Image (cartoon, grey):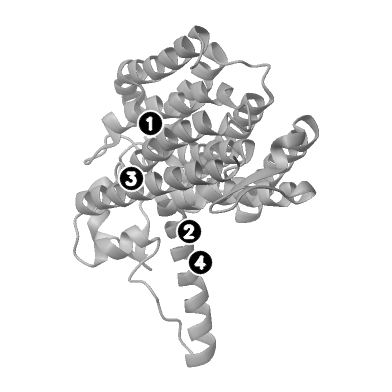
């Protein structure tokens, strides 16, 4: 049973971002429109605008400023800032949000889908993840204990650092790739964050990480408030400012709580989105070498566009991905409970 202080923190974390979004949202959208901060729309093929998304031209982006801003401010206001886990989540979220802002700004000023260079993006994510993982490894000796489904707890020692790097960087980019349809990324983040809050509550029996609950519920509330304006047809996009930061935040929570392997299941939609891009790139290069011309494995990647090209509407793809995300999240939670029971 949580003490009253933590219960109050959770209640405030659920209220402040959502109410704040409803108040700030219309004003922010108006400001972004006035600044002509429209989202450049990705081309389906060279020189031809993706027909399914022509209506999105001019929709303002960088709504992540509100989303992530409310998460950070709420966490600063209600959470235990002396807690190492909270500190790491805040730092990684802030750095990846700043990176996303630079990327969005570059896209808007260039009027192109090409933002900052890939190497710069990976480099800054690497530094943030490395600093976080080393700090955790030194400050929290038990952080190297990883929860393994059907096994229990496994202490991986110093291997925690490379695993943390992979999880934080990978999740940040995976959520970024998922943010391609109205409401898709924010809806999946609500599901994943809710389940992770349940997992954190369960994992406290072996890892006292309950201080992360206000942070997670702030993400749930902020994403719900953002979805109010981002559902189809979207009035604003979160942009890389939001998606890179949300992914970085979720990956850091998994690293702090020893649930890195379970994140692969709970965040299965994010994993599928990232894998589809990797498969598409590999297959295109492989067939270009073998057959003299590049061929696509999917109709279009990330995979949500593959289903769009197959004839499903944007709303159908989004809702069905939410359903899959919910089922995977429940499976991940069940495996968490099972692994914890194995420990006793």
Marks 4/2 in contact by CB < 8 Å: the verdict is yes
51 left or right of 152?
left
Comes first in the chain, label 4 or label 3: 4
Measured as percent of width and height from the top left, residue 121 is found at: 62, 48
Q: CA distance from mark 4 to mark 2?
A: 6 Å
Q: Between marks 2 and 1, how big is the CA–CA gap?
A: 21 Å
Earlier along the polypeptide chain: callout 2 or callout 1?
1
Which callout, 3 or 2, points at the residue further toward the start of the chain?
2
State the image coordinates of residue 269 (x, y, percent, origin top left): 40, 53
Residue lying at 51% horizontally and 47% vertically, measured from the top left: 263
Residue 144 sits above or below residue 295 on the image: above
Question: Is residue 88 among what the camera can see?
Answer: yes
Residue that badge 2 annotates: 274
* Distance between the alpha carbons at the discs numbered 3 and 1: 16 Å
x 27%, y 63%: residue: 307
Distance from the alpha carbon under mark 3 to that under mark 2? 18 Å
In the image, which is nearer the foreground, mark 3 or mark 1? Answer: 3
Whether the residues at callouts 4 and 1 have beta carbons within 8 Å, the answer is no
Closer to the chain start, of discs 4 and 1, is 1
- Choose between 296 and 159: the one closer to the eye: 159
Disc tally is 4
Between marks 3 and 2 in the image, the one whose residue lies nearer the viewer:
3
Q: How many C-alpha atoms fall within 10 Å of the one at disc 1: few (<14), some, or many (≥20)?
A: many
Name the mark on residue 278.
4
| Rendered image: mark on residue 326 | 3
Q: CA distance from mark 4 to mark 1?
A: 27 Å
Q: Which mark is residue 223?
A: 1
């Amino acid at each position: 049973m949580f003490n009253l202080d933590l219960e109050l923190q959770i209640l405030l974390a659920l209220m402040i971002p959502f109410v704040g979004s409803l108040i700030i949202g219309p004003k922010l959208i108006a400001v972004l429109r006035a600044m002509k901060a429209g989202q450049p729309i990705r081309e389906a093929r060279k020189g031809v605008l993706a027909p399914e998304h022509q209506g999105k031209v001019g929709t303002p982006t960088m709504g992540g400023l509100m989303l992530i801003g409310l998460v950070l401010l709420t966490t600063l206001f209600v959470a235990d800032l002396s807690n190492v886990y909270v500190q790491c989540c805040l730092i990684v979220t802030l750095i990846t949000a700043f990176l996303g802002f630079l990327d969005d700004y570059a896209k808007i000023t260039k009027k192109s889908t090409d933002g900052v260079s890939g190497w710069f993006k990976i480099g800054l994510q690497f530094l943030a993840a490395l600093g976080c993982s080393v700090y955790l490894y030194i400050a929290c000796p038990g952080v190297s204990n990883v929860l393994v489904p059907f096994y229990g707890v496994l202490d991986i020692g110093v291997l925690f650092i490379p695993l943390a790097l992979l999880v934080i960087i990978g999740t940040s980019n995976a959520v970024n790739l998922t943010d391609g349809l109205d409401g898709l990324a924010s809806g999946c983040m609500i599901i994943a964050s809710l389940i992770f809050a349940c997992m954190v509550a369960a994992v406290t029996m072996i890892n006292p990480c309950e201080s992360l609950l206000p942070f997670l519920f702030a993400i749930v509330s902020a994403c719900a408030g953002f979805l109010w304006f981002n559902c189809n047809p979207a009035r604003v996009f979160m942009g890389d400012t939001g998606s890179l930061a949300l992914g970085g935040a979720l990956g850091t929570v998994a690293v702090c709580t020893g649930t890195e392997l379970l994140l692969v299941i709970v965040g299965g939609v994010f994993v599928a989105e990232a894998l589809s891009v990797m498969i598409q790139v590999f297959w295109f290069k492989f067939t270009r070498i073998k057959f003299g011309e590049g061929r696509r494995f999917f109709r279009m990647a990330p995979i949500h566009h593959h289903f769009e090209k197959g004839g499903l509407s944007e709303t159908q793809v989004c809702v069905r991905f939410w359903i899959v995300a919910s089922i995977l999240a429940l499976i991940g939670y069940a495996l968490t409970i099972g692994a914890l029971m194995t420990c006793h």
